[in-house]
Amino acid sequence: MTTVTFTKQPTILPASKTESIFDDMGYPAAPVARLRGAFAAGYVGDLDITRRVLDMHAALATAGIQGALRIAFAPDFALLGQDASAAPIVTRAFGLGSYGLDWLAGGDPGLKITAVGTTAPRSVLDIKGSIGTNPKITAAAGADLINGLTGVTMMAAINLAAVQAAQTSFFSVRYNGSGFFGIGMISGKLQAIVRRTTAVAAAQILVDPPAINMWVIVTVRFDPATGAVAVLVNDVPATGLSGTFTDTGASVSVATTSTCDVQIGSVVSGQRPGLLSDVWIFDKALTTGEATAAYTAMRAANPQMP
C-alpha cells in the first residue's frame, strides 16, 4: 500500500484542476481519476482526508480487489462509482455545509453532513439529524450496473441511532424503483436485501443489530449461484441470522433496457437509521481473505472507529 506523508496545509485542492497532486504517487488510476473529476466539479477537500480515501483504494489494489469495486460512496466525495460501460454515476461532489449536499440532480435533499474523529476527521451522513420527511439522495445509472453480476459484496460503515421497527435504509441499489441490494433495518433487526431477478421477491436476511451509537462495518456477501448469503459485523459473522435466498442462478439478470439507481438514505414514519460513512459494492462475492482485507482498509480510513 502506498503511504504518503504530507505537511498539514491550510489550503485545499483548487476546484479547477485537471490533474491532482496524487496523480504520480502510485495510487490506483481509477479512484484518482474520479477524485480528479470531483475536484473539477467543485469539490473542496482536505489533503489528509483525500489521502485516507486513496489509501483505502491502494489497500484494495494490494489485495487484488480494487478492480471489482463497482461503487464507492463517501460523504467527503459523493459517489465514485461507475456502471459497466465505465461511465461515472455522478460527476458532482458534495459541498461540506451543514445541509449543503450538492447532488447531481440538484437541490437539497435534507441529508445532513457532520464531521467525526479527531485526527483528519471524516465527513459522514447524519441521517438521524437530517431534515424533511424522507431525506435521501439518488443517482441514476444503467441497468448494466447490476445485470450479469456473478456475485455481490456490500460493505458499509454505520452507526445505529436506535433499534428501528419500521423499515429504514442506509443505502440500496434499486431497479425500476424496486430494491435489489441494500443494508438497512426492519422489525428491530439489521436487514440485508439481496435479489437475483425481478421474477422473485427480494430476500430479506435479518441479523441481530449492532450496539447503539457504536461505529461498525457491516459486510454482506451474496453468491447468486448457490444462494449463500453471509452477514458480518466487524468481520465477524453476525448472530441471529434468519431468512434464506432461493432464486439461485449463474448471475443477476435484469433487462438491460431498463434503469437502476443508487439510493443513499431513506426513512419511514420519521424513524432514521443513524450515521453513514463509506459504502462499497463489489461485483463479486469476496473470499474470506478478501473481505478481511477490505474491512481492514475501510476501518483504517475511519478514525471514528473504536
Image: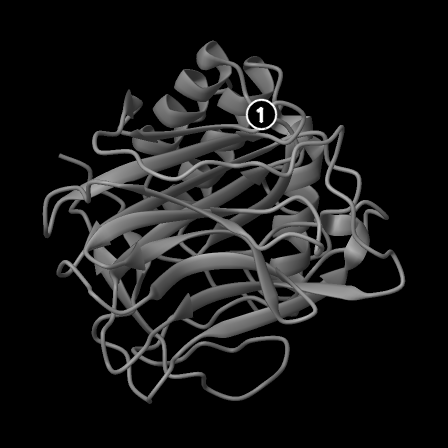
| Residue found at the very far top of the displayed protein | 289
Residue 269 on image: x %, y %:
26, 82
Residue 303: in sight, yes or no?
no
Colouring convention used in this rendered image of the protein: one colour
Q: Nearer the viewer, residue 14 or 238?
A: 238
Q: Give x and y (percent) for residue 100.
A: 40, 80
> Which quadrant of the structure image shows residue 244?
top left
Q: Which residue shows up at 58% across the image and 25% down it?
A: 285
Left or right of 171 on screen, residue 177: right
Amino acid identity at mark 1:
Ala
Few, some or many C-alpha atoms within 10 Å of disc 1 (few <14, some 14-19, many ≥20)?
many
Q: Is residue 187 left or right of residue 195?
A: left
In the foreground, 238 or 120: 238
Under tag 1, what secondary structure? loop
Residue depicted at x 39% and y 79%: 135
- Residue drawn at the location 14% of the way across and 58% of the way down: 163
User: Is residue 200 shown left or right of residue 215?
Assistant: right
**Is there any visible trace of residue 143 in the rendered image?**
yes
Picture quarter with the C terminus: top left
| Mark 1, residue position | 285
Where residue 69 appears, as percent x and y from the top left, is 62, 35
